[in-house]
Image (cartoon, helix red, strand yellow):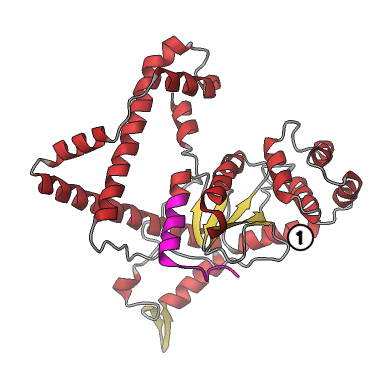
Amino acid sequence: MAGVVALLLGTQGAAQTTVRGQVENRSQTGGDQAPLAVVGDRTFTVAEVDARWKADSPVRHAEAQQAVYEGRRAAIDALLADWLLDRGAAAKGVPREQFEAEETARRTAPVTDDEIAEFYEANRTQVEGRSLEEMRPILREFLEEERKMAAHAALVAALRAAAPGLRVLLSAPRHRIALDPADPVDGPATAPVTIVEFADFECPFCQRAAPTLSRLRQAYGDRVRLVWKDMPLTRIHARAFLAAQAGRCAHDQGKFWIYHDRMFDAPRGLTAAALKEYAGDVGLNVSRFDACLDGGTHAVAVKDAVATAAQLGLSSTPTTFINGRMLSGARSYQEFAAVVDEELRAGVTDRVR
């Protein structure tokens, strides 16, 4: 059942790197100008050391920054949840365990037979040939546990929303992402939240992320714009480089996003012949598209995009930036939406240009 659980929850993300001891807490060293090494009359500061680290190893530098932020943020959220749950239990005059159990149960709807059957059908390839009746008790237990977890999260969210003066002061690491006029964009330039995705058309996790990002665009309307950045991982995806060029050829005709969706559907793969067939499927001028693809019109531009990703220290796809805040992997809709909501509340927009 591990495969079923992973498929449903979308837990796949970029591999995390252990960074204990790699990042010095600047509050302990006195800030960016604090000395880290001295030789003769020469002093090396935190800022200088970090700049060299970033230049020499951009991937590890970015991973370290993000890992420290995510670890601290998870700890803050856990501490806040404990405090809020204790406070809620005290207000009702009951033990915390009782308060959590009752409030979670109140928010948990029962799992129906129809829901179990629907989940079974959606994950039939993961159950190794076992029948619905064989799987029913296992699936019921799994779905009930998932629903309890969601209800508990909703309880904590409600307590946070009602808490007086609750603010998280920890700042997320941000990256200034340069936008190119040639980048495919969905949404207005005036949107307060810009989501920039570095992705690869042959990447299965990019394929999984695509409907999630589309859902965000629909849910938030003109408050969000999506920007696509090519990052074909040519060492592991032999057809990704050509597919990236194909996307740009479709963009030349104003149909990037519909062609983007067609490539991720990819019923016939991403061969040159299939890419040309998809052009006809989505209503492109096929002759113009074929000339663009065969002539390598956008090959240099795609190489430049890959170089830009490398300069940012990116090594896996999808990597998404929400107003400069990095999220690696095919995260859930809830994870993306939480960051979008934070950005809307904070009014942070000057992170892309």
Counting from the top left corner in percent of width and height, residue 341 is at 43, 56
In-front residue for pair 48/79: 79
Looking at the image, is 287 positioned above or below residue 352? above
Q: Is residue 32 left or right of residue 259?
A: left
Where residue 284 sits: x, y (%)?
83, 45
Q: Residue at x 29, y 39 (%)?
A: 152
Q: Determine whether the residue tagged by mark 1 lies in a helix, strand or loop.
A: helix
Determine the residue positioned at 71% across, 66% down. Answer: 181
Quarter placement of the N terminus:
top left
Left or right: 15 in relation to 295? left
**Residue 101: quadrant of the picture:** top left
Decide which of 47, 244 is in the foreground and name it.
244
Q: Is residue 101 magenta?
A: no
Residue type indicated by callout 1 = Ala
Task: Tell me where the magenta segment starts and ends, as one range.
Answer: 337-353
Image point 27% across, 47% down: which residue? 156
Q: Quadrant of the C terminus?
A: bottom right
Please say whether residue 103 is visible from this viewpoint: yes
When the figure is inspected, residue 311 is found, relative to residue 231, above or below; the finding is: below
From this viewpoint, which residue is outermost toward the left?
93
Question: Farthest residue toward the bottom?
Answer: 41
Q: Is residue 166 depicted above or below 246 in this figure?
A: below
Location of residue 22 by image quarter: bottom left
Q: Is residue 296 left or right of residue 48?
A: right
127 sits to left or right of 304: left
Residue 345 falls within the magenta-colored stretch: yes
| Residue closer to the observer: 338 or 79 | 338
Q: Which x, y percent locates residue 309?
A: 62, 59
- For disc 1, the marked residue is 301
